[in-house]
Amino acid sequence: MALFSAGAGTWRPPLMSPEPLEPRTRLVATAQHGAERPRGWSEMSQKAVARSKHWQRHLWTRGLHDLHDCELQFRSSGEWEVLKLFQLSRERHQQLHSTASSPAAPAASPLTPMQVSEKSVKWLLFASCLSLLGFTMPGPALPGIRSRYTLHGFWTGLVAASMSMGMLVAVTFWPHKSDSWGRRKVLVWSLSVTTGLYAVQALALMYFGFQYFVLVRVVTGFFAGCNPIFKAYLADVVPSDRLPFYMVYREASATMAFIIGPTVGGILTTKFGITAPFVATAVAHFVGVIVLVFFVEESKRHVDEEGTPNYEVEEAQKDDWPLLRKVFAMSFCYVVSQTCFTFFMPLYLNDTFELAPRGIGWCLTGTSIAVLFFQVCVYKPFEKWKGLEKTGICGAVAIFIGLFFVAYTNVCPDKALDKALLCIGVLFYAFGSATFPTTVPTLLAQSVPKHHRGKVLGLDSFMNNIGRVLTPLCLGFLYGRKEWNRFKCFFVAGCASLLVAFLLEWVRRERTRT
């Protein structure tokens, strides 16, 4: 309460320490944008603004709005302690008011350092790109593999599902072991084994029957479940205030694999045959092993910054398992849409537009370039504007719209519009693929302690691989030579992405209420 000195009639602030902020409000006052925001952000922001107005009402009254006037008055009377308290109060008010009223504005404090060098993270992203070439390079060779073995429907889908079957085992074992063995050690082991197995796939494709080729792909999948380990490494070493953006960079490195892979795979398939992409993938994985061994640092032990096990955080986050189940469901539905586009798009381009492997490669590369553009140039400002959950919702809806336009090109009565609709659909799909995927690992990393991230991200990858197994097999029954069958295939996959948007909105409202 404002006080007046006796006789002089001048105002003096109370000789007491400023009222301490509540812990939850202090988080709002000091949080940077992109940091791990606590639940109840909107409510805490309102509390912070109210507290800010409380400071303004008690400290900036009686005409003393200018700090210079205060300094002159208090210096003349020699009351230095009062002046110091007033300056501290004003600084606290300005910090709290600016942060609470505009939570999207970045703080001016220095960035939290990473646990490893930034070069190590960049080399890890490069190795992540190399590891994904096994999924992207053989894509343009799929029509040739179908012709090589005279495959139809279910059996064509089995080519893609076979490797994911093996990964169902891998993602339940390797990510969990990386929590204790170390991220880099498991990554080196995984890429070393798959280097040899991709070469064996090429030999099986050249000299043996379909059943042997599928068997080798299943065995390759046993050692190929390292994608969640890359994410867990980033979650370990990158501070939470920068984690969403580094997850975008990881997705961008994956997009580079989708840019390079189809183009190189299409050229190699055209010039050297359907075995060439598998040999090139083996070489890429070998380069990835060299990068991991010589240029990537091992992440620290999975304890908190004080060096003690993170039991308190684990205890506090046990109630987040209902949220994790919803996130797993979102991840599964998203993979249904993604697998449909990744696997059936080469067949669709060949059957509908009669494109050769090189043309298929260029189309898939163009899609990946669009995804990379949205990731690098659009995601960061869009996420600052909308927030993590709303950005993911927009991305999921965009994927639905994109797959619908792709499906409609089969049944559109005006065939002159086919290519225009295809381009529009691809652009919508590219925007969704750039803005949604980082939502899942970021939510998971924020919901569990460090020493459980490998396990939880492995469970997420397990759900993903169930989707990668079931999607080609189930949608393979829908996809066929008839136009309406192709429409059903892509439309069903689009509806799965629409379900993702509803689940994410449910999660967003729960996180806001609690």
Image: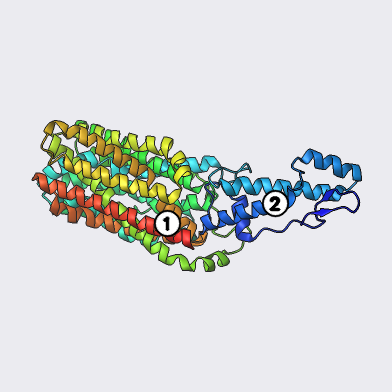
Residue drawn where x is 29% and y is 52% of the image: 498
The kind of residue on which mark 1 rests is Arg
- Rendering quarter of residue 506: bottom left
Q: Which residue is mark 1?
A: 508
Q: Front-most of 102 and 493?
A: 102
Q: At which x and y percent is residue 163? A: 26, 53
Residue drawn where x is 23% and y is 57% of the image: 470
Left/right of residue 117 with respect to residue 65 in the rendered view: left
- Rendering quarter of residue 461: bottom left
Residue 175 in sight from this viewpoint: no
User: Helix, strand, or loop for circle 1?
Assistant: helix
User: Helix, strand, or loop for circle 2?
Assistant: helix
The image shows a total of numbered marks equal to 2
The kind of residue on which mark 2 rests is Arg
Q: Which residue is mark 2?
A: 57
Q: At which x and y percent is residue 332? A: 31, 57
Q: Front-most of 368 and 397?
A: 397
